[in-house]
Amino acid sequence: MSGHSKWSKIKRQKAQTDKRKSKIWARLSRDVTVAAREGGGDPEMNARLNLAIDKAKAENMPKDNIERAVKRGIGEIEGEDYEEVTYEGYAPGGIAVFVEALTDNTNRTVADLRHLFTKSGGSLGKSGSVGYLFERKAVFEVKVDGNDELMLFEIVAEAGADDMQLDDDVYVITAPVEVYDAVESALLAAGIDTEESSLVRTPTTTMQLSESEAQKVVNLIDQIEDLPDVQAVFTTLEMNGAAFASVS
């Protein structure tokens, strides 16, 4: 899971200097809308909506924007009809790439992705071509400072987490998606703040590349993430020391 944590740090560093808040908010708004549509408008009864709202708040998205997104999802106000879609392919160096998107035009989204993959020297594949290389997981990051490792492990393990690793200044906790609420509630009850919580696709196998090859993959990921329809990107790239230093 250290690879996931490093990617998270890179994204946080980028977000701190990203001035295009409207684009970030638009992406988060879609996530809130679809979460409300699929599971209802009460975040206490809809874990996915609760997570989407938490992420929106973390990006300082105005309360009114969040409420409108929820209302669009439950049909109180009109809005675009977004569809959840996933795409799979290979980046340079044979790195598997899994893309999650929300779109109101699948033809546009797949055309945009195919263009980026082809331009980078990779290829967009068929459904199932790389999906088997990833597992759906709930991930929580907790600061090392102020938290006892053994006590934290006991809390999350009792709630159903299946792994906890130290990665620099954070503990990375992983759990089955089904116990996301239980782990989140256990941490909240213990007064433990999370640096980040998310539902991710973790690779079951990874590949290391040279610094230059890794940079090509990262460039592709950056371009994919810049597409307005894309919500998240996951890869099998192992961020070794040289690659991580280069990307950071």
Image (cartoon, rainbow, N blue to C red):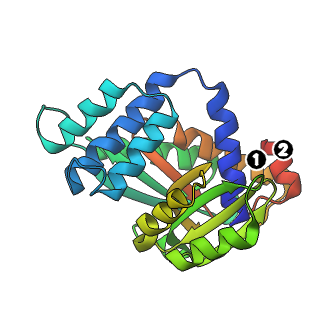
Dot 1, how many residues are within 10 Å of its Cα: few (below 14), some (14-19), or many (20+)?
some
Of residues 1 and 196, the one drawn nearer to the viewer in this rendering = 196
Label number found at residue 172 = none
Judge from the rendering whether residue 238 lies leftward or rightward of residue 197; answer left or right.
right
Q: Is residue 61 above or below residue 94?
A: above
Label 2's element? helix
Label number found at residue 215 = 1
Q: Position of residue 40 (x, y in %)?
A: 20, 52
Whether the residues at callouts 1 and 2 have beta carbons within 8 Å, the answer is yes
Q: Position of residue 226 (x, y in %)?
A: 52, 35
Of residues 61 and 181, the one drawn nearer to the viewer in this rendering = 181
Outermost residue to the front:
190
The answer for how far apart the CA atoms under marks 1 and 2 are is: 7 Å
Q: Based on the displayed image, in which of its 4 quarters is residue 223 positioned?
A: top right
Judge from the rendering whether residue 245 lies leftward or rightward of residue 131; answer left or right.
right
Q: Position of residue 103 (x, y in %)?
A: 31, 43
Of residues 36 and 238, the one drawn nearer to the viewer in this rendering = 36
